[in-house]
C-alpha cells in the first residue's frame, strides 16, 4: 500500500469506529454480554483454524529470529485458546461499568449531583506478538462501551485475524455494529503513525509492548496515551525471608513464563543472607536454566556471570536475571528508585515494618509481598483480562480492565433551582 492508501484506510476505519462508539455508548448490558459469549463460542468452534493460522505466525517468527521467550508469547495451543475463551466469558460475566454511580450528593442550592461512569469513546490499541491481546482488548473495550481499533504485531498477523473474526461474529450475533471492534488489516508500520495522530477519531491510545514501541508512541502521539512501559520487575530478599517462600516465589516469578511483563528481571539480596539463602536461590535459578548476571559480591558462586551497568534496569524477557547484594531494605529501595519502570516490585520478608516501608516508599503500579510477580495480570486480579499494565499516574494505573476504560460525567438535577 502507498502512504496515501494507508492514510485513506485509517481515516475510514476511524470514521466507522466513531460511528460505532456512538451506538455502543447506550448499548444494553445484555447485548454486550451476548456479544462476548458469542465471540467465546466462535473462538472455541474455530480453534483448529486459529491454531493453523498460528502455525503460520510461528514460522514467520522463527524466520524473523524471535527468541524462544518471544515465540512462547506468540504460540497458541488448545489450552491457551481455552484460556482466551474463558477470559471472554469472565469479562462477559462482570458487572457492566457504564452508568455506575461513582458518587452522588446534594448541595444547599437545591441541586443533586451524580458522577457516573461513561465510555471513553474510541480506543486505539497497538500491541506486539501476543495474539490473545486481540481478544482481551476487544472484549474489555466492548464491555466498557468503547469502540476499538486493534493494531497487532506483524508476528501475530494471522492468529489475530482469526480471533478478530470471532469477535465480529459475536457482535453481529448480538445486533451490535461490526465496526465496534476493528483490526488494522496490514503489517505496514505507517498505519501505527496514522493512529497516533487521529485526534478526530481516537480518544486514547494504549501501547502494549517493548520499550521501542512505547517510546515511539510517547514521542509521536498526539492522542492521549495510557502507557504500558516495560516490566523491569525487582524482587528483594529481606534478611527475614522465609527460605521456602523465597525459593518458591523467586523460581516461579522468573521461570514460569520468562517472556511476560510480570517476570522477575532483578533479584536484590540482603547482605545478611547473601552467603546462605542468597546462594541457595541463585544456585536454584542456575539449575533451572536461568543465566544469573551478578555483581562482584556474587562472583564466588559457580556459574554466575559478572553483571555490567547495562544489566541494571534491563527487561530481558528471557531466561536471564540480574542479581545484586544490598546493605539493607533502604539499599533495595534506592536501587529500585533508580532502575524501576514503575510496573511491579516485590519484597520477600517476615518483618511487617519492612513490608510497610517497602509499600510506602516504592511507587510502582503493583507492589507485592511474598507473592510471585507473575500475578501481575488483570485476569489474576479478577478483571477477566487486561488491555495492559499502565505504568503512568494519570487516570488508569496497573492492570487496565473494563472499569479503567471509562471516564465519567456529572448528572445534575433539581426542582427548578436557579443560581443567585
Image: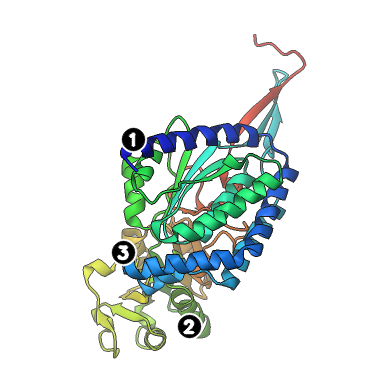
Looking at the rendered structure, which numbered label has been put on residue 387? none
Furthest toward the top, the residue is: 420
Q: Quadrant of residue 3?
A: top left
Q: In the structure shown, which secondary structural element does the residue marked by tag 1 occupy?
A: helix
Mark pair 1, 2: CA separation: 56 Å
- In the picture, measured across the screen, residue 149 lies left or right of residue 231, that is right
Q: In the structure shown, which secondary structural element does the residue marked by tag 3 occupy?
A: loop
44 shown above or below 251: above
Q: Residues within 10 Å of mark 3 (few under 14, many from 20)?
A: many
Nearer the observer, 104 or 178: 178
Tell me which residue sits at (37%, 39%) in the image: 6
Mark pair 3, 2: CA separation: 23 Å
Q: In the structure shown, which secondary structural element does the residue marked by tag 2 occupy?
A: helix
Residue 265 percent location from the top left of the image: 38, 70
- In the picture, measured across the screen, residue 238 lies left or right of residue 65, that is right
Which residue has dot 3 on it? 313
Nearer the observer, 61 or 270: 61
Q: Residues within 10 Å of mark 2 (few under 14, many from 20)?
A: many
Which residue has dot 2 on it? 247
Amino acid at each position: 500500500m502507498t502512504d496515501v492508501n494507508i492514510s485513506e484506510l485509517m481515516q475510514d476505519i476511524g470514521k466507522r469506529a466513531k460511528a460505532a462508539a456512538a451506538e455502543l455508548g447506550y448499548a444494553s448490558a445484555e447485548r454486550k454480554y451476548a456479544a462476548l459469549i458469542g465471540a467465546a463460542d466462535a473462538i472455541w468452534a474455530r480453534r483448529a483454524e486459529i491454531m493453523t493460522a498460528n502455525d503460520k505466525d510461528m514460522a514467520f517468527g522463527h524466520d524473523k529470529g524471535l527468541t524462544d521467550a518471544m515465540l512462547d508469547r506468540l504460540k497458541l495451543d488448545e489450552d491457551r485458546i481455552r484460556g482466551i475463551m474463558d477470559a471472554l466469558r469472565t469479562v462477559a460475566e462482570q458487572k457492566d461499568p457504564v452508568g455506575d454511580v461513582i458518587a452522588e450528593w446534594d448541595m444547599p442550592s437545591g441541586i443533586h449531583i451524580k458522577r457516573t461512569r461513561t465510555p471513553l469513546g474510541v480506543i486505539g490499541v497497538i500491541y506486539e506478538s501476543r495474539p490473545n491481546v486481540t481478544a482481551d482488548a476487544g472484549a474489555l473495550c466492548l464491555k466498557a462501551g468503547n469502540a476499538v481499533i486493534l493494531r497487532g504485531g506483524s508476528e501475530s498477523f494471522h492468529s489475530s485475524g482469526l480471533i478478530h473474526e470471532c469477535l465480529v461474529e459475536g457482535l453481529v450475533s448480538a445486533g451490535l455494529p461490526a465496526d465496534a471492534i476493528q483490526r488494522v488489516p496490514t503489517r505496514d508500520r505507517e498505519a501505527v503513525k496514522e493512529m497516533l495522530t487521529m485526534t478526530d477519531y481516537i480518544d486514547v491510545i494504549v501501547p502494549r509492548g517493548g520499550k521501542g514501541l512505547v517510546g515511539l508512541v510517547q514521542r509521536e502521539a498526539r492522542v492521549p496515551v495510557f502507557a504500558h512501559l516495560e516490566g523491569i520487575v525487582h524482587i528483594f530478599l529481606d534478611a527475614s525471608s522465609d527460605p521456602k517462600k523465597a525459593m518458591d516465589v523467586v523460581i516461579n516469578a522468573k521461570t514460569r513464563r520468562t517472556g511476560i511483563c510480570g517476570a522477575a528481571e532483578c533479584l536484590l539480596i540482603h547482605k545478611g543472607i547473601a552467603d546462605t539463602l542468597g546462594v541457595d536461590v541463585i544456585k536454584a535459578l542456575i539449575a533451572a536454566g536461568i543465566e544469573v548476571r551478578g555483581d562482584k559480591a556474587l562472583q564466588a558462586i559457580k556459574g554466575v556471570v559478572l553483571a555490567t551497568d547495562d544489566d541494571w534496569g534491563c527487561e530481558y524477557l528471557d531466561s536471564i536475571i540480574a542479581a545484586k547484594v544490598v546493605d539493607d531494605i533502604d539499599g533495595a529501595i534506592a536501587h529500585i528508585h533508580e532502575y524501576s519502570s514503575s510496573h511491579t516490585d516485590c519484597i520477600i520478608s517476615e518483618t511487617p515494618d519492612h513490608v510497610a516501608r517497602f509499600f510506602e516508599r516504592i511507587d510502582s503500579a503493583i507492589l507485592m509481598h511474598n507473592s510471585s510477580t507473575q500475578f501481575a495480570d488483570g485476569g489474576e486480579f479478577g478483571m477477566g483480562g487486561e488491555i495492559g499494565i499502565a505504568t503512568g499516574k494519570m487516570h488508569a494505573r496497573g492492570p487496565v480492565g473494563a472499569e479503567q476504560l471509562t471516564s465519567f460525567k456529572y448528572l445534575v438535577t433539581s426542582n427548578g433551582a436557579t443560581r443567585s
